Amino acid sequence: MRDVLLTVVRGLGFGSVYALLAVSFVIIYKSSKVVSFAQPALMLAGAVLVSYLAGPVGFYLAVPLAAVAIGMLGWGLERTTIRPMIGRPVFVVAIITLGLDIAIRVVVNVFIGPDVRNVGDPWGLSTVSIAGLPVQERYIAMAVVLLVVGAGLFAFFRYSRYGLAMRASSLDQETALVQGVPVGSMTALAWAMAAGIAAVAGAFVGAGGGVDQSTWVIALKALPAIIIGGLDSIGGAVVGGLLVGLVESFFATYQGEYLPWLGQNFALVSPYVLLLVVLLVRPYGLFGTREVERV
Amino acid sequence: MTAVREPSSESPTPTPAPAKGRRPLGRPLLHTAYGQDMALLNTGAKKVSVLVLLVVALLLPFLLEDDLLRLLATGCVLAIGAIGLNLVTGYAGQVSLGHAFFLGIGAYTAAVVSGDPDDDRLWGLGITFLPVWLLAGGLAAALVGLVVAPLASRLRGLYLAIVTLGLVFLGTHVWNEWDAVTGGIGVGRPAADPVLFGVDLSRRSEVFSADQQLYLLMFVLLCVFALLGRNIARSAMGRSFAAVRDRDIAAEVTGVDVRKVKRRAFVISGFYAGCAGALLYSITGYLDPSSFGLLLSVQFVAMVLIGGVSTISGSIMGAFFIALLPRLTRELPEYLPFMSSSATETPNVFQVETLLYGLLIVAFLLLEPRGLFGLWVRIRNYWKAWPFSY
């Protein structure tokens, strides 16, 4: 029982980070109908920036600063490479983001160097005892960040003018334009927000273990999450992210014991198995909108 | 796609067009029959240039250094893989980021078929005859393509891209863990031996060096696969691919069996990828499970996009471009003194190389979406109309 609970806590902790990443994918998808393969690079860039800033200004200030900086980077990317591609097939734009991802990661890797970089988080691997369970503090921090960012996003989309404008332009760009919504700026804003959220997620991916040149792969685990949740549902992304975290955590704990023939580290690829299973049953994810097709 | 022609009351039954129309004298570019338009070499210039290219390519082994020939041989094999990806992604419009997975299946099947049967660490059947392991690799990957294809008929666009991306990760996991086939992480295994009629082409013979033989072998194979690809593209199958790509529902309405077309596209693409995988590592003679990661898939996507989407010649150009890119970046330290050729210093040529993959994809998509083939078309059209602007 204790094992099960600890597994659940770890799953929800990492699941929160996956959920954050998934939210960043979904925000971009809703604004420009593109799955941004640049998110891994933006996440890594955020984590590295935090690792450099945490020394001088402290971790708590470094995270928002990095989020703003990477947000600006996301804004710049949208302006320079995504904006000229409006009206072109989404596949082409997705491949452009793939190219951006590769290019940015080369630059970021230079700043990481060959070793693991500590992001300077205050938690490390220390634990706190909750009802007799030794829960790692970083899992609590991850969950709290998801709650804070999620609540902030909810309030933003529900109550602010810009949130309303963004929802309008994702619903129907032309109609939104007619109503005076600057759709282009909203897309840029979406990219900036998504990049910022990815940077925050990056800081928490690095919490406890630090980041190295291969950490970017973690961001791709958000892809199963958004597919499971449906590409255009933020709530679905959160559920999908937590689900992916739980599945991965349970495989990490129990697969070696019950399914040893799947090999070591199967937990790392288990989200993709989950992805295949979900898509075979529900092609548009659990919460996605079914596309209505016409010729 | 069946050609049912019902007699209509309004128009008289059309007279069947002559199967092979005659070109009017002095108008070599005027096509009077569909067959002429769809011919493999439909203009005189193409006939001449293809002939020249063939002759030059066959002369190259006697003109170039061995290391460059090896690079060109790799380019030929990459081109086979790129044609495969172009058929499924460019012609049939089914975005696949899982090409590396199919390459891996082909490479390992071939390695197992050709492997040493006495080795108790690795599986091996000991059949080193090239056509056998090549076909085995291709067919194994095609079979997996058949298994994956139902996913494509349920999913579209980016959903499919993400699922195929997942396949790469699952594949990498399998390669890392299945020691009996792959040798395991960091150990690897010998790849298939290119033996043809008792001659091991990867060893120096009396007449040719190993690289000359490999280049000629890969070049001939590329010609076969390219011709096959071109014929698929210009036949009914290619047209049904294009119909599904352009609008699958419209294709279905006009009588194209979309599921069948997608299945065919994945099977053919898998076959190409499997063959390319089997051949690619027989050049270096060694394969490591970490080779079949996302970067390999991205490289193939880059070949297709840089070369030109839905063109066979473009795929070949793109493949050679990507194959020769490392060679070009290796030259950089001579011209840029701050550039290092050692992997541990910064900035080094390997970083530049990876950066270029990324930036070139972005630049080509932004500036010339038709890729190198598009650049060629521009040049051709300029000179066709010269000295007029159009």
Image: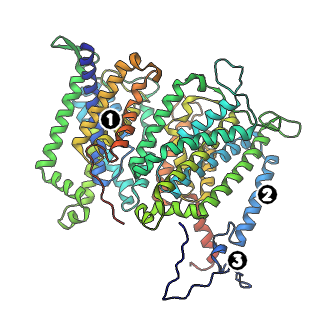
- Give how far across and how far down residue A41 sits, in percent: 39, 39
Cα–Cα span, label 2 and label 1: 53 Å
Tell whether label 3 touches label 2 (CB within 8 Å): no
Q: Chain of mark 1?
A: A
Q: Is residue B13 above or below residue A118?
A: below
Q: Is A155 situated left or right of B349 in this image?
A: left
Q: Is residue B275 above or below residue B183?
A: below
- Name the residue furthest right: B206
Count every numbered label the image shows and give the total: 3
* Disc 2 versus disc 1: nearer the observer: 2
Residue B55's disc is: 2
| Residue A45: quarter of image | top left
Say which residue label 3 marks: B20
* Disc 3 versus disc 1: nearer the observer: 3
Cα–Cα span, label 3 and label 1: 64 Å
| Residue A52 appears in view | yes
- Give how far across and how far down residue A130 sits, in percent: 16, 15
Q: Earlier in the sequence, mark 2 or mark 3?
A: 3
Under circle 3, the secondary element is loop
Q: Is B296 situated left or right of B17 in this image?
A: left
Looking at the image, which residue is at 15% across and 38% down?
A: A151
Which quarter of the figure is the C terminus of chain A placed in? bottom left
**Labels 3 and 1 share a subunit:** no
Q: Chain of mark 3?
A: B
Which quarter of the figure is the N terminus of chain A placed in? top left
Q: How is the image coloured?
A: rainbow
| Residue A47: quarter of image | top left
Say which residue label 1 marks: A46
Dot 1 alpha-carbon crowd within 10 angstroms: few under 14, some 14 to 19, many 20 or more:
many
Residue B307's disc is: none
